[in-house]
């Protein structure tokens, strides 16, 4: 009798567990097919490692501050060993970003520049790096001041010209080097737009060439470069993904099942993971958690950033104090059509723009001194609008025009922002 009861109970438990496992599988199978807005709104809302076998799912993930994890009596580990190598909060963040970018894997870092630095460390000096001639100055400085000293050299070219890229790749290939092409969508601060699809297709014709796109200014709520054939996508998560100017972070996402046939990109990604784990170039559990929280509102924030930026760009386009406006959402932008084919939502061209003023550097500095709502600060992607005279913060050899002001458009009332700019431009 007792034996029968025990068997019955055991069967009940097995069936219950099967049901539970089926429920989880169904839940996540359907989760992977939902739209990005749904994924973002529930970022991190998922069962995490829990040593107490607690089957509840926290709707807001816990923060695992522990740097070390207990070993079993037989010296095995349940999952984590030490937080430099892996940490439950960081793992959840990486899984979440990989999914948002339609990738299979993601490495997170202490900052966007830390992500670039880890990539460059991983590729080693048997490679040659191609960057845009109007790249984010921090990427150029990392190469010039750090990696060139170790024999990893680079070339700066116009990444909007496919013939120039082809020539450069062929020159590097005759030297027997691997090619690491880093693009930006769009470039910082001139907002030029390389054709990611065309560049990826070109590189696929050569062995050991990879294309990494810095999509910080787009975020996954506007564009997914992995869907366009890019091998890896890099972000400074300090910006839109965090979204509140209160954390530093970076990431590189990768799709193992991507269409790279020579598997060079897999080798590089594996090496990036080694660099991340062995150097401890990681975000803290708290920054990882803040980033997961920021992601939940990313789609709603991006919608407003883009809407405000578009209205401001339209207002500035015909302003007589302005010599040039750089915003890919305007039909007059030289790569408007290229940008339109790469974004997943037709109305979203980003929250960043730059203007070049007729009165040169003096006028630009004067305008930035007169704004009252825009904050004079570097960085971007927060809820508050920022204005910045770029040339005075970039290194001397930067090609940024003297008269350029970069604007990060926030979530304020757009009429207030336009009034603020109008007053500063007129007086
Ligand atoms: C396009 C781009 N990539 C990378 C970075 C570097 O990011 P972080 O400041 O997080 O190191 C920045 C910073 O402004 C950026 O604009």
Image (tube, rainbow, N blue to C red):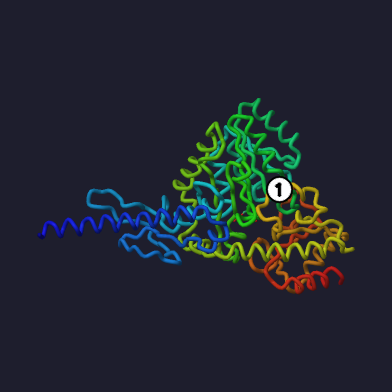
Q: Position of residue 63 (x, y in %)?
A: 43, 64
With 192 as the anchor, is 215 left or right in this view? left
Q: Position of residue 124 (x, y in %)?
A: 55, 36
Residue at 68%, 28% in the rendered image: 170
Instruction: Identify the image quadrant of the C terminus.
Output: bottom right
Q: How many marks?
A: 1
Question: Residue placed farthest to the right in the image?
Answer: 320
With 311 as the anchor, is 20 left or right in this view? left
Residue at 42%, 54% in the rendered image: 26
Instruction: Identify the image quadrant of the N terminus.
Output: bottom left
Residue at 63%, 49% in the rendered image: 214
With 78 as the anchor, is 146 left or right in this view? right
Q: Pick whichever, 168 or 307, lies toward us.
A: 307
Q: Pick whichever, 116 or 320, lies toward us.
A: 320
Residue under circle 1?
341
Q: Quadrant of residue 355?
A: bottom right
Q: Position of residue 21 (x, y in %)?
A: 35, 55
* Element at label 1: helix
Q: Position of residue 264 (x, y in %)?
A: 54, 34
Ligand 1 falls in quadrant: bottom right
């Amino acid at each position: 009798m007792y034996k029968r009861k025990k068997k019955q109970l055991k069967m009940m438990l097995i069936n219950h567990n099967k049901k539970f496992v089926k429920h989880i599988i169904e839940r996540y199978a359907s989760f992977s097919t939902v739209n990005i807005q749904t994924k973002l709104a529930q970022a991190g809302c998922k069962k995490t490692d829990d040593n107490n076998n607690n089957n509840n799912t926290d709707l807001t993930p816990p923060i695992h501050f522990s740097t070390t994890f207990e070993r079993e009596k037989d010296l095995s580990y349940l999952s984590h060993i030490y937080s430099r190598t892996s940490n439950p909060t960081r793992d959840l963040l990486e899984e979440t970003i990989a999914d948002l970018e339609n990738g299979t894997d993601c490495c997170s870092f202490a900052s966007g520049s830390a992500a670039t630095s880890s990539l460059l460390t991983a590729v080693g000096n048997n490679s040659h790096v191609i960057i845009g001639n109007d790249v984010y100055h921090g990427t150029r400085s990392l190469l010039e001041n750090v990696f060139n000293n170790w024999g990893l050299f680079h070339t700066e070219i116009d990444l909007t010209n496919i013939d120039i890229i082809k020539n450069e790749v062929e020159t590097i290939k005759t030297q027997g080097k691997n090619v690491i092409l880093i693009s930006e969508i769009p470039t910082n601060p001139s907002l030029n737009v390389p054709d990611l699809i065309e560049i990826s297709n070109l590189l696929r014709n050569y062995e050991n060439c990879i294309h990494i796109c810095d999509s910080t200014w787009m975020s996954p709520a506007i564009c997914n470069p992995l869907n366009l054939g890019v091998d890896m996508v890099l972000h400074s998560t300090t910006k839109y993904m965090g979204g509140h100017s209160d954390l530093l972070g970076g990431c590189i996402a990768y799709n193992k099942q991507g269409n790279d046939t020579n598997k060079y990109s897999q080798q590089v990604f594996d090496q990036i993971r080694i660099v991340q784990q062995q150097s401890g170039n990681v975000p803290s559990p708290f920054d990882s958690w803040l980033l997961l929280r920021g992601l939940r509102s990313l789609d709603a924030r991006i919608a407003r950033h883009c809407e405000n930026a578009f209205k401001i760009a339209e207002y500035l386009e015909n302003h007589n104090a302005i010599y040039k406006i750089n915003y890919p959402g305007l039909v007059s932008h030289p790569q408007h059509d290229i940008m339109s084919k790469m974004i997943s939502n037709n109305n979203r061209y980003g929250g960043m723009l730059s203007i070049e003023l007729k009165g040169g550097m003096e006028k630009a500095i004067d305008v930035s001194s007169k704004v009252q709502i825009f904050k004079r600060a570097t960085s971007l992607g927060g809820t508050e609008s920022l204005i910045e005279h770029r040339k005075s913060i970039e290194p001397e050899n930067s090609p940024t025009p003297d008269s350029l002001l970069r604007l990060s458009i926030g979530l304020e009332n757009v009429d207030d922002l336009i009034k603020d700019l109008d007053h500063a431009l007129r007086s």
